């Protein structure tokens, strides 16, 4: 690492209800950041693909490509190229792995915990906050193994059509920065023990594009949280890359083109007047096209694919859990709908699109149902389940049955299993076309249960052997705790 | 946007009534106000560079940025690079500037410069530029000189006829005298043009600070560039498709776009063998005139 006197200014700020740390990084080591490696600035009238990478030292870690003819609302092609563990600098690895622990486990202040990491960032203004993350690729796949091959990922567009440019949201979906080969069950177990013991675990993420952030630390913690049904929190570091402009109407009132009124990142839009003047000036002086020191090498590596010697399968339980997580459209709907009361849901169930003479969601009934489902699933699973069941049980809404049943089939839940069993048993001709779906779901859920039971029995058996207990019965959490005790006693022995 | 990695520049107007921050945006701080008005480059209508200032016309307001407000010539060239980089990405901006030897930066594109087999640092020399200009003048005005010679010869022949009469007997005197006079006339016109061209480029040499800077010259598969070394990033180039033809003189290679010389590459920076290679390399991409 080159020795540079770093200059970091931090401000605790609140805009609306959003609290965050605003950071101005000048004269940094410039080890971590994003850079455009191709297609950036050729003829502006020409639509060439734009490839941006996340780099860490001399490693190009993630490739994000906006396809040709794309615009700011187009989703990007994403794939992992390398890993942060391939970086040939132990200092960087140590710093990356210590931020999450310092903040979440040892309860240091965000400024103190982040400081060594901020010194690694490229120059710029960053918003840092602690938020809940979703360890999936936004489409029901577990994040750690979802980016091995390049493909278009919904929700990666710089700006979201549904939510618009000016809405605040958390870039909560994850892109890994280590290889799935590095997944270790023992490490996940250790993190689960921490959780079971009431300790906080978390990670560190760097915003990439749209709703997606690169997870720099906390892969095993994210997996453990998923398995323990605990929320996974991260410090998210979001570069202030964008501007918010006046609306055309506002600008027209002054007879001018829309002016910049705020600096913007997904989490917050900070009005120009609220930004410390020195920080605003350094923002205006800084250029977007500054390339990292190792640019030529990074550009050479930018189009490689992640090489894995062996491909360890991620346990099925994790994959199934990831399927239950909210997806991109659920988050979009959650932002598109501000509130959905029980009365409004009742009106939707009655086939209405209006309640109290106001359109509830959309003039299109089918669209309203989809959006309501997304919103409810993200905000409150029980309300979603009740709403979905009410639709399926309503013979007047048969047009929506197929969609709702397919949607329920995508989730792995006992309530849904029981509901499908009961509907199937009714033998109602209304559900004749859906019986195969119910049967498939019931079969797969029961297999999932038996797999879980087998796994639990194996673990209990091993524990019994290790501790000399015969015929012990454990709950999931007590099993994890007992396993920790067994391991620590083995360590002492 | 080309030259988007050059640092932004902060500069004050005359009497410090305004402070400008020029980078990815054009920001204007009015005296006594904390928050700037931030313009996007798409809002800028025109930019003019003259001897003493840059004049930016944006959203119906004219801002004057004095060159004296910049600490040194390097900063001035930096600002010129930022402005011309903005023009390269916003071709609707009307841009006018003084005559230059170095290619204006709005001609550049930013991207992968491809293989760069020829890359060298050096300075322009006033003498070789002037010499080349005179040679170019010769080439460009060759037909006009021939016409002048023909007119002068005919005129002298007719004058001699009227003065001496009896042309049938004296034509063998008249012809060499007329031819000699034609030659003298062409020589005089040529000398006047050469003095004007010499003065013009000598003046340019004094007024353009870029010519006293070290220049990085690059010829690559993607294009060519001649950029002040302190502004050179290796990612900007003028694509070959933008050029029309090239001329090779004893001292320089000159590449033309729309009949204007945009790129001067001094031959002395390369060995004889490399000069031949470069000539071939350019020849593969452009027509030689």
Image (cartoon, rainbow, N blue to C red):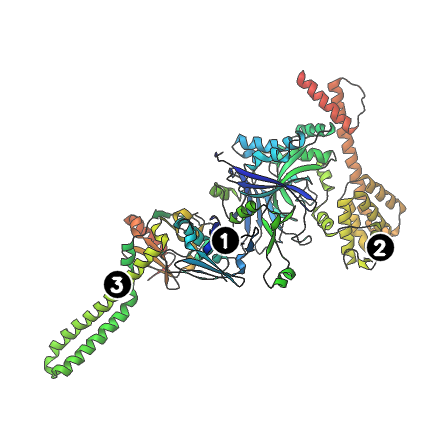
Image spot of residue A390 (x, y percent): 85, 49
| Farthest-out residue, top | A493
Residue appearing at x 14%, y 80% in the figure:
B160
User: In front: mark 1 or mark 3?
Assistant: 1
Image spot of residue A418 (x, y percent): 85, 41
* Residue A217 visible: no
- Are labels 3 and 2 on one chain? no
| Farthest-out residue, left | B169
- Are labels 1 and 2 on one chain? no
Q: Quadrant of residue A459?
A: top right
Q: Nearer the viewer, residue B65 or A207?
A: B65
Q: Nearer the viewer, residue A408 or B270?
A: B270
User: In front: mark 1 or mark 2?
Assistant: 1
Q: CA distance from mark 1 to mark 3?
A: 41 Å
Q: Secondary structure at mark 1?
A: strand
Q: On the rendered structure, is A96 left or right of B101?
A: right
Q: Secondary structure at mark 2?
A: helix
Q: CA distance from mark 1 to mark 2?
A: 57 Å
Disc ID at residue B20 = 1
- Identify the residue under disc 3: B195
Q: Are marks 3 and 2 in contact (CB under 8 Å)?
A: no
Q: Does B6 appear above or below A183?
A: below
Image spot of residue A376 (x, y percent): 78, 47
Q: Quadrant of the C terminus of chain A?
A: top right
- Identify the residue under disc 2: A347
If you read the primary sequence from the N terminus, does the residue marked by circle 1 or circle 3 appear first?
Answer: 1
Q: Nearer the viewer, residue B157 or A16?
A: A16
* Residue A106 visible: yes
Tell me which chain the residue with mark 1 is part of.
B
User: In front: mark 3 or mark 2?
Assistant: 3
Q: Are marks 1 and 2 in contact (CB under 8 Å)?
A: no
Residue appearing at x 61%, y 62% in the figure:
A254
């Amino acid at each position: 690492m080159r020795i540079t006197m770093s200059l970091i200014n931090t401000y605790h700020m609140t805009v609306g209800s959003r609290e965050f740390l605003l950071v101005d990084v000048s004269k940094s080591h410039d080890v971590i950041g994003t850079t455009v490696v191709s297609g950036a600035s050729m003829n502006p009238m020409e639509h060439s693909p734009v490839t941006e990478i996340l780099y860490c030292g001399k490693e190009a870690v993630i490739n994000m490509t906006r396809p040709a003819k794309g615009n700011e609302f187009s989703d990007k092609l994403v794939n992992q190229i390398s890993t942060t563990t391939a970086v040939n600098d132990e200092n960087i690895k140590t710093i990356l792995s210590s931020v999450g622990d310092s903040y979440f486990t040892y309860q240091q202040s965000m400024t103190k915990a982040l400081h060594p990491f901020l010194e690694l960032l490229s120059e710029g203004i960053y918003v840092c906050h602690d938020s809940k993350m979703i360890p999936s690729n936004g489409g029901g796949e577990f994040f750690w193994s979802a980016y091995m091959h390049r493909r278009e990922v919904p929700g990666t567009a710089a700006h979201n059509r549904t939510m618009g440019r000016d809405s605040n949201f958390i870039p909560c979906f994850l892109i890994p920065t280590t290889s799935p080969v590095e997944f270790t069950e023992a490490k996940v177990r250790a993190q689960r023990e921490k959780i079971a013991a009431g300790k906080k675990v978390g990670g560190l993420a760097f915003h990439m594009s749209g709703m997606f952030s690169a997870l720099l630390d906390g892969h095993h913690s994210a997996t453990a949280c998923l398995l323990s049904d605990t929320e996974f929190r991260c410090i998210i570091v979001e570069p202030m890359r964008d501007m918010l402009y006046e609306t055309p109407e506002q600008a027209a009132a002054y007879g001018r083109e829309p002016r910049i009124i705020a600096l913007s990142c997904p989490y917050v839009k900070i009005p120009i007047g609220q930004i410390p003047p020195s920080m605003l000036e350094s923002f205006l002086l800084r250029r977007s096209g500054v390339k990292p020191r190792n640019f030529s090498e990074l550009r050479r590596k930018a189009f490689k694919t992640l090489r894995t010697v062996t491909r360890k399968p991620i346990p099925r339980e994790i994959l199934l859990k990831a399927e239950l997580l909210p997806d991109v459209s659920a988050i979009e709907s959650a932002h598109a709908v501000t509130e959905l009361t029980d009365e409004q849901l009742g009106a939707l169930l009655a086939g209405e699109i209006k309640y109290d003479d106001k359109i509830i969601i959309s003039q299109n009934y089918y669209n309203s149902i989809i959006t309501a489902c997304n919103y409810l699933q993200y905000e409150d699973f029980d309300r979603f389940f009740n709403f979905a069941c009410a639709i399926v049980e309503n013979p007047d809404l048969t047009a929506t049955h197929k969609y709702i049943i397919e949607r329920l089939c995508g989730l792995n839940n006992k309530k849904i299993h029981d509901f499908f069993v009961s509907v199937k048993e009714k033998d109602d001709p209304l559900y004749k076309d859906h019986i195969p779906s119910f049967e498939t779901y019931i079969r797969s859920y029961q297999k999932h249960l038996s797999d879980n039971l087998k796994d639990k029995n194996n673990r209990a058996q091993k524990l019994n052997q290790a501790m000399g207990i015969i015929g012990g019965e454990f709950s999931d959490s007590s099993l994890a705790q007992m396993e920790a005790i067994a391991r620590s006693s083995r360590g002492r022995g | 946007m080309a030259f988007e990695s050059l640092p932004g520049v902060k500069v004050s107007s005359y009497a410090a009534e305004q402070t400008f921050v020029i980078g990815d945006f054009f920001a204007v701080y009015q005296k006594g106000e904390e928050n700037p008005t931030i313009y996007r480059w798409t809002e800028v209508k025109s930019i003019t560079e003259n001897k003493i200032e840059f004049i930016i016309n944006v959203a119906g307001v004219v801002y004057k940025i004095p060159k004296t407000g910049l600490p040194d010539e390097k900063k001035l060239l930096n600002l010129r690079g930022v402005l011309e980089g903005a023009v390269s990405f916003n071709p609707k901006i009307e841009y006018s500037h003084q005559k230059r030897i170095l290619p204006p930066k709005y001609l550049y594109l930013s991207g992968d410069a491809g293989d760069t087999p020829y890359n060298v640092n050096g300075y322009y020399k006033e003498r070789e530029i002037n010499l080349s200009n005179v040679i170019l003048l010769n080439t460009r005005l060759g037909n006009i000189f021939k016409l002048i010679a023909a007119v002068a010869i005919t005129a002298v022949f007719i004058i001699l006829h009227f003065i001496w009469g009896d042309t049938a007997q004296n034509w063998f005197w008249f012809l060499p005298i007329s031819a000699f006079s034609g030659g003298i006339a062409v020589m005089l016109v040529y000398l006047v043009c050469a003095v004007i061209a010499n003065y013009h480029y000598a003046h340019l040499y004094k007024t353009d600070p870029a010519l006293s800077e070290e220049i990085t010259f690059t010829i690559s598969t993607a294009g060519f560039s001649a950029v002040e070394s302190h502004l050179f990033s290796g990612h900007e180039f003028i694509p070959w498709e933008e050029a029309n033809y090239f001329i090779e003189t004893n001292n320089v290679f000159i590449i033309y776009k729309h009949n204007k010389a945009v790129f001067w590459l001094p031959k002395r920076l390369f060995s004889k063998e490399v000069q031949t290679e470069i000539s071939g390399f350019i020849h593969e991409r452009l027509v030689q005139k």
